[in-house]
Amino acid sequence: MPDLSGKTLFITGASRGIGKSIAMRAAGDGANIVVAAKTTEPHPRLPGTIYTAADEIEAAGGRALPMTVDVRDLDAMITAVEKAKTAFGGIDILVNNASAISLTGTLETPMKRFDLMFSVNVRATFACSQACLPHLKCAQNPHILNLAPPLDMRARWFKDHCAYTMSKYGMSMCVLGMAEEFKQDGVAVNALWPRTVINTAAVAMVGGPIKPANCRTPEIVAEAAYVILTRDAKTCTGNFFIDDEVLAEEGIRDLERYAVTPGAALVSDLFVE
């Protein structure tokens, strides 16, 4: 079976949450992980830094390169990509995981927050893909994976948080366009989204009525990402995957291991029925 041994993954937002879980799953194969995130000092509300994540990755069997990267800073991103190539000889996989969220209506969304979501979600996804693609085109079985939802243009997904939806769908449209653009180069470009809300620090910071007991853990997304990233890039591109559907295709249907509280009712994530 294919694995990620010796592969180099450039993961944005890899210091915690889903990004870190994807890194840890790949590290178990002995992969090289570029931890591209901006947290270098412990945060009072957000656990983990690029350095603690790097330590855990190496303890799990991988090699880690912690890089201080604010994905809004183009120069910092390009520098990180070049250092990754120097350290590991190339880049095989890009995971665009970094994201900003504000579930606010139009009148309640300050333009500063609007700009943040578009800078992190849309612009950074495009820019990081652009920076990594010359290296990906030289790799064997290269993949770009965006943590982005399936495109569903019904008004129900826009009416309560129009700005956030537009920004996440911008990441999805990168998949739609780049998958076709780079198909002849053999670079796979796909999206992955969770069926249920995932218990992360970001969800806790947003607040609201969702309790951790009604969520799944980031490991379900990491396992689905692993399945996608080990598939043949030439035949697996342009897809909008849902995590549990990916696992079902692999015969994994008992998902209780991924529940924060086994047996508790789960809350569906945005953009899925």
Image (spheres, grey):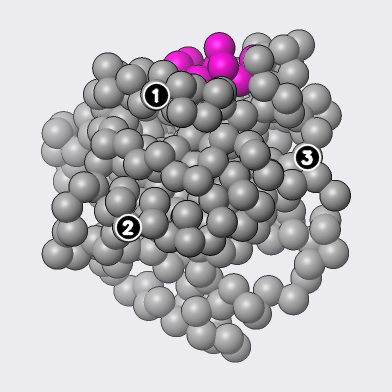
Q: Categorize mark 2 by other alpha carbons within 10 Å: few (<14), some (14-19), many (20+).
A: some
Q: How far is mark 3 from mark 2, CA to CA?
A: 30 Å
Q: Is residue 167 left or right of residue 214?
A: left
* Element type at mark 2: helix
Amino acid bearing label 1: Lys
Tag nearer the camera, 3 or 2: 2
Residue shown at 23%/47% (left/top)?
39
Q: Nearest to the eye among marks 1 and 3: give it.
A: 1
Q: Which mark is residue 83?
A: 1
Rendering quarter of residue 201? bottom left
> Which portion, as a residue range, is magenta?
127-137
Q: Residue 116 magenta-drawn? A: no
Q: Amino acid at mark 2?
A: Thr
**Marked residue nearer the N-terminal end (3 or 2):** 2
Say which residue appears at 83% left-offset and 56% top-offset. 249
Can you name the residue that lies furthest to the bottom here? 263
Q: Is residue 105 visible?
A: no
Residue at 40% in and 77% down: 212
Callout 3, which amino acid? Arg
Q: Nearer the viewer, residue 232 or 108?
A: 232
**In the image, 11: left or right of 207?**
right
Q: Position of residue 60 (x, y in %)?
A: 53, 61
Tell me which label, 1 or 2, sits earlier in the chain: 2
Q: Name the main secondary structure of what is drawn in magenta.
A: helix
Task: Check disc 2 and report the residue beneath it.
Answer: 52
* Residue of label 3: 231
